[in-house]
Amino acid sequence: KAGVTQTPRYLIKTRGQQVTLSCSPISGHRSVSWYQQTPGQGLQFLFEYFSETQRNKGNFPGRFSGRQFSNSRSEMNVSTLELGDSALYLCASSKGNPTDTQYFGPGTRLTVL
Amino acid sequence: EDQVTQSPEALRLQEGESSSLNCSYTVSGLRGLFWYRQDPGKGPEFLFTLYSAGEEKEKERLKATLTKKESFLHITAPKPEDSATYLCAVLQTSGSRLTFGEGTQLTVNP
């Protein structure tokens, strides 16, 4: 069974630009969660989508947004990039029950210059 | 606010030298505690889920245990390929978000 895939794997952007990251969950999984990982803050929850609806949201500014499509694929968008947005962005998929195990993708490494 | 604290931050072991990693948590209501392993440049890889105090799970050289306040990841006779960062995360009673600890970076020398 194919795992969670994320594209692109690496991105370099400049301040003020916007970026869109993509996540394809494991087949049959309906929930996709996004996390930001930085050396100083560790893994922090951004938001979760289930059946095309945002079900949970972390404490990030409105510049961070996402959506989910009918095939459960999800995208995350960051507008007006700041230097502090440089991080590894991870998505995780699960079947949909909150207690189900979340399986992570390889991540997208975003560098903001 | 949920808090997860892992200790030690870093641990160096010789091959075959057993040890334990600690994950202490403060949550309003625990629905599950998850252990992941993360290699450099990769996403976290799932290891175990524990749901209630007293529960134990094993996989190869790893054994995870859970009490009402903390979890331990015991590593028996580790090998160099066990070198990685080990992360624990808690799922609180309400919601579906995981709150992660900072991780323990384990290095096993041959």
Image (cartoon, coloured by chain):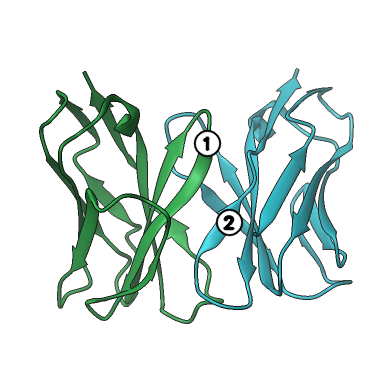
Chain colours: A green, B cyan
Q: Position of residue B92 (x, y in %)?
A: 63, 70
The N terminus of chain A appears in which quarter of the rendering?
bottom left
The residue at which mark 1 appears reads as: A41
Q: Residues within 10 Å of mark 1 (few under 14, many from 20)?
A: few
Q: Is residue B1 left or right of residue A35?
A: right
The residue located at (25%, 53%) in the rendering is A62
Q: Which amino acid does the dot numbered 2 rest on? A: Thr
Q: Which amino acid does the dot numbered 1 rest on? A: Gln
Q: Is residue A108 left or right of residue B67?
A: left
Q: Chain of mark 1?
A: A
Regarding residue B79, the answer to whether it shows in the image is: yes
**In the displayed structure, would residue B97 be above or below residue B41?**
below
Tell me the SS state at disc 1: loop
Q: Position of residue A93 (x, y in %)?
A: 38, 65
Q: Position of residue A97 (x, y in %)?
A: 48, 82
Regarding residue A74, the answer to whether it shows in the image is: no
Task: Have a look at marks 1 and 2 and say if they share a chain.
Answer: no
